Image: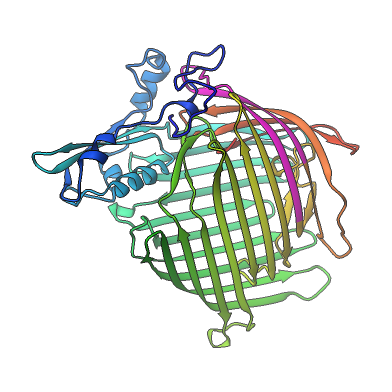
Amino acid sequence: MSSVFRSAAYSADAAPEGGNEPRPDITAPATKDANVITAVDGSYSIGTITILPANVFDLSNPDEDTLIGRVGDILHVVTMEGTIRNELLFKEGDPYDKELIEETERNIRLRTYLTEVQIVTKPNPVTKTVDVTVKTKDHWTLIIGGTVGGTNQNGVVGLDVGEKNLAGLGQTLSYSYRHDNTGASNSAAFSDPNLAGTRYALGLSYLQTPMEIDKSVSFQRPFYSLETESSHGISYSSKAHFEPTLNYNSYRLVAFYGLAYFFYDEILRPSVALSIGEQNVLYPTVPSTATRDNKIELTLAALEEPRNFAKDSYIQSVRQTEDIPLGAQYTYLVGQALETLGSTTTETSLSFQATKWTRLFERDYLYGALSLAVNDDNFNKQLADLQAQYFFRRFLLHTLFFNFHASYLDSDSNRFYLGATTGLRGYPVNQFVGRNLILINLEDRIYTYQSMLFGIIEPGFVLFLDSGDAWNNFTGDTFHGLYSDVGAGLRFGILKAPGISLVRIDYGVPLGYKGAPVISLGVSGTF
């Protein structure tokens, strides 16, 4: 994968020491549209549109022309041309718009069943048209396999069956089974981002664990483009939670409608929503409490420089082009619970969210996110959440990663969890529980940029130091001090899997705590 950034210390076609593949994040930027930029003016229109979807394995490449590659391509259903065409923000005969071409490429790249997306444009000065070719390459999307993970103190086994690109239509259908020390869990999901070839999206999910049952359904026409003028939809979710000391159940029904207003370098998206919800909290020794929270909500989303993106790789994923939004996004919400809607409260809901990526020193990235809420839709009375991440990318094979996360929560039901795969990798799963959280992670991420096993796997390594705590789970549960651990881990990027999944194996050793080291294994989309 190419990048728009290059390091002065290395040539554009440099290869890691001992390797035979160019480092993806310092390859020279593509210049496929240079002739269009200089030759095309406002009088050009879109000519012919050609869709060229490719299978998972490139059999013209000797490294992939193997028995696995040939059988894999036979079993895999290639993404349908119509599925890709449904994602286009332009059609034949439309005025040529370079920004729409670039946005279309970014949107298609978000579909995890695709590993490569490239839109090539070719102007024709005679006809005053621009012919467009959309090239895509599929991931392997059929999932039939088992899962072994968790930690050495709480092992997890399971079964996964699903298809991330059902019949090449871009739909997802999946079922998972898990079993650990707490019991058995089942989950199923279906999603279609372009229902029946329209811009409507449908999502269904079900999750059953020993302590919880979650259900959700959503049907909406989202802001699928920066040029989309309106959005609307409806969603329903429910949760039933069971613990010896706390049981609760809740549901939330939301219907919304939004508009978009366009300015030179900003987009404003106001929306109105009807939110109907109820929560019942059951304590063993006190009477249950029921809260009906029915309200009207007004939201304003402000997108600054929404078309300002950096195309890079090896930021959060492995060997995959990442579109980093460099413009800020702010979301403001005010809601009022109304007795006329059947609400048992008259509380006012307020929230503010802000996210921002910043590129520093040409190659580094800083990410920040802030959330503040009062009486939100998740039945939190108060919420404050701050996260900052820094990606220090000055070395050929290394990225130094820093993460800071702090949260405060006032809720009868919701909690934060830390331990093993949830942040403190040297401690057992959910060792720390509370309504307050602080977490600090420092990692040296080591990339190899080398594929193995017929181009299916790319290994990586990580050295880490974690520190944090979760507290205020009950009255009198005060801050315990920062618990820390050190360790190392392996990463295996499954290059042909949807979204380039990462198998993560971590070995964490607690510091200043009498506990055994923890080995955790899991699958994630990020390093």
- The count of marks equals 0
Image position of 439 (left or right of 260): right
Residue 64 in view in this figure: yes
Q: Residue at x 51, y 58 (%)?
A: 329
Say if the magenta span includes residue 452. yes
Image position of 116 (left or right of 404): left
Image position of 473 (left or right of 344): right
Q: Is 144 situated above or below 458?
A: below
Residue 64 position in % (x across, y down): 40, 17
The region drawn magenta spans 437-466
Q: Which of the 4 quarters of the picture holds residue 315? A: top right
Considering the whole magenta stretch, tell me its main secondary structure: strand
Residue 469 position in % (x across, y down): 80, 49
Q: Is 287 situated above or below 76?
A: below
| Colouring | rainbow
Q: Residue at x 45, y 22 (%)?
A: 12
Of residue 253 and residue 471, the one placed in the foreground of this image is: 471
Query: In which quadrant is the C terminus drawn?
Result: top right
Q: Which of the 4 quarters of the picture holds residue 57? A: top left
Residue 482 position in % (x across, y down): 84, 47
Q: Which of the 4 quarters of the picture holds residue 460? A: top right
Say if the magenta span includes residue 108. no
Residue 87 in view in this figure: no
Query: In which quadrant is the N terminus drawn?
Result: top left
Of residue 40 and residue 427, the one placed in the foreground of this image is: 40
Q: Residue furthest left?
A: 126
